[in-house]
Image (cartoon, rainbow, N blue to C red):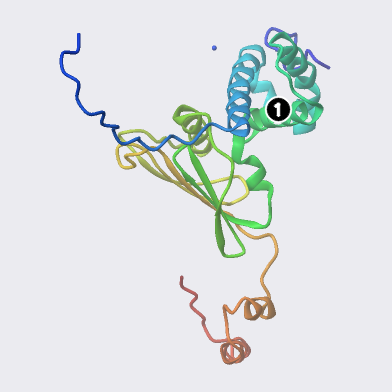
Amino acid sequence: MLGRFIKGSSEHQAVTKVEPLVVPPVAPALAPITDAESRREEFLTLKVELHRHLIDRFNLTALENASKDEILNEIRPIVREFVRNRTVPLNARELDQLTSDTADEMLGLGPIEPLLKDDSIADILINTHKRVFIERRGIIEETSIRFRDEAHLLRIINKIVSAIGRRVDESAPMVDARLADGSRVNIAVRPISVDGPLVSIRKFSKNRYSLERLMAFNSIRPPMIDLLRIAVQARKSILVSG
């Protein structure tokens, strides 16, 4: 099966006076780079190199209709060979994660693909390539996810906008778009976003909120529920705003 998506297949990076000793103030030390941060940086670098290697080798057009399982089966032996040739010490879990992340880069939206699949997340907020936030049950929290660099984030952005025939650049630095699942996307790049690209993704919940759940969230009070029920029974027009 390995030949299906490969390019070229049939189917297709001196002191004269002693002065009193004055000790200058010591500047605060920079925070040391932890082993975890160093490991994460190494992992990100490896993912970028591997992605470039696969892009050069695979026929991307043939991948468009392939499932993630098919892609995983195709790239798994290539990933193992790639890692072995670079003598990178990865355990089995890290190797599986590298393979899955690479498939997400090729098929989906890279680092944020797992966030898109998490139904408990309502919003994904990308504040330049360095920080990614999510909103879950009304609480905003920062994730450990980040992009390799600004070029990596821009590549994912271009994948989003090109799917709907749009573009985003200096001449058109703001774009509104939608993902295939209907999620709303707002994008701003330089020069409007001076520190780097900003992306907001508003996901739609697959589970409808009942009046009881809204009341449990303190989003609505019992008298308002009674009013809505009466309005519906009387077939009145209702305007929902916000």
Comparing 202 with 231, the one in front is: 202
Residue 25: percent from the left, percent from the top? 31, 36
User: Can you say whether 121 is above or below 207 in the image?
Assistant: above
Residue 185: percent from the left, percent from the top? 49, 48
Q: Residue at left 73%, top 17%?
A: 5
Comparing 87 with 46, the one in front is: 87
Residue wearing tag 1: 98
Q: Which quadrant of the figure has residue 43? A: top right
Q: Residue furthest left?
A: 16
Q: Quarter holding the N terminus?
A: top right
User: Can you say whether 118 is above or below 5 in the image?
Assistant: below
Label 1 packing within 10 angstroms: few (<14), some (14-19), many (20+): many
Residue 215: percent from the left, percent from the top? 63, 81
Q: Residue at left 70%, top 16%?
A: 88
Q: Which quadrant of the figure has residue 22? A: top left
Q: Residue at left 66%, top 71%?
A: 209
Under mark 1, the amino acid is: Leu
User: Can you say whether 185 is above or below 195 in the image?
Assistant: below
User: Can you say whether 107 is above or below 56 in the image?
Assistant: below
Is 218 left or right of 172, judged from the image as shown? Answer: right
Comparing 197 with 108, the one in front is: 197
Is 144 left or right of 200, judged from the image as shown? Answer: right
Comparing 31 with 161, the one in front is: 31
